[in-house]
Image (tube, rainbow, N blue to C red):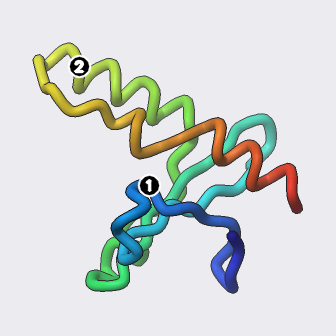
C-alpha cells in the first residue's frame, strides 16, 4: 500500500492503527513506524536501516527476551512493496 508518507504495510493485520513504512536508501531498506493513536512515534523515531534492526534483534535475543522484533520488520514484504514502485 502507499500513501503520502510512502509505502507501508500493517505488521499485525488486525491492527490498522499501526503501519510500518519502508523505503530504499542506497543498498539498504529502511523502516519507520507510524501510529494513528500516537503521532509522536513518527516524529521522534526516524528511518532505521534493516541491518541495524537485525543487530538490535540479536541483542534483544541475547537478553533472553521471548518476543522476536524481526516478526514486526518484514524484509520480504518490504521488498515486494518497493518492487511495485
| Relative depth, front residue between 75 and 62 | 75
10 Å crowding of disc 1: few (<14), some (14-19), many (20+): some
Q: Height in image: 78 above or below 12?
A: above
Residue 47 percent coordinates (x, y): 53, 57
CA separation in Å, label 1 and label 2: 20 Å
Does residue 19 appear to the left or right of 24 in the view shown? left
Image-based side of 25 in relation to 65, left or right: right
Q: In terms of secondary structure, where does tag 1 sit?
A: loop
Q: Secondary structure at mark 2?
A: helix
Q: Residue most toward the front?
A: 14
Q: Residue at x 51, y 48 (%)?
A: 48
Of residues 21 and 30, the one nearer the viewer is 21
The image position of residue 78, as x and y in percent, is 66, 47
**Which percent across, then down, holds residue 16?**
40, 74
* In the displayed structure image, the side of residue 22 where residue 41 appears, left or right: left
- Check the image and report above or below for 63 versus 18: above
The one of 60 and 44 positioned closer to us in this rendering: 60
Q: Quadrant of the C terminus?
A: bottom right
Which one is in front in this view, the residue at disc 1 or the one at disc 2? 1
Q: Evaluate if marks 1 and 2 touch, with contact meaning CB atoms under 8 Å apart.
A: no
Q: Which mark is residue 11?
A: 1
As drawn, which residue projects farthest toward the left? 64
Q: Residue at x 35, y 30 (%)?
A: 56
User: Residue 64 appears in which quarter of the rendering?
Assistant: top left
Question: Does residue 34 lie above or below 73 as drawn?
Answer: below
Dot 1 or dot 2, earlier in sequence: 1
Could you say which disc has been placed on residue 61 in the image?
2
Amino acid at each position: 500500500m502507499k500513501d503520502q508518507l510512502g509505502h507501508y504495510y500493517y505488521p499485525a493485520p488486525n491492527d490498522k492503527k499501526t503501519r510500518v513504512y519502508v523505503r530504499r536508501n542506497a543498498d539498504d531498506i529502511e523502516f519507520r513506524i507510524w501510529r494513528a493513536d500516537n503521532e509522536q512515534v513518527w516524529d521522534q523515531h526516524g528511518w532505521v536501516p534493516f541491518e541495524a534492526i537485525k543487530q538490535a534483534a540479536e541483542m534483544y535475543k541475547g537478553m533472553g527476551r521471548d518476543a522476536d522484533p524481526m516478526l514486526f520488520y518484514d524484509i520480504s514484504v518490504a521488498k515486494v512493496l518497493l518492487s511495485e514502485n
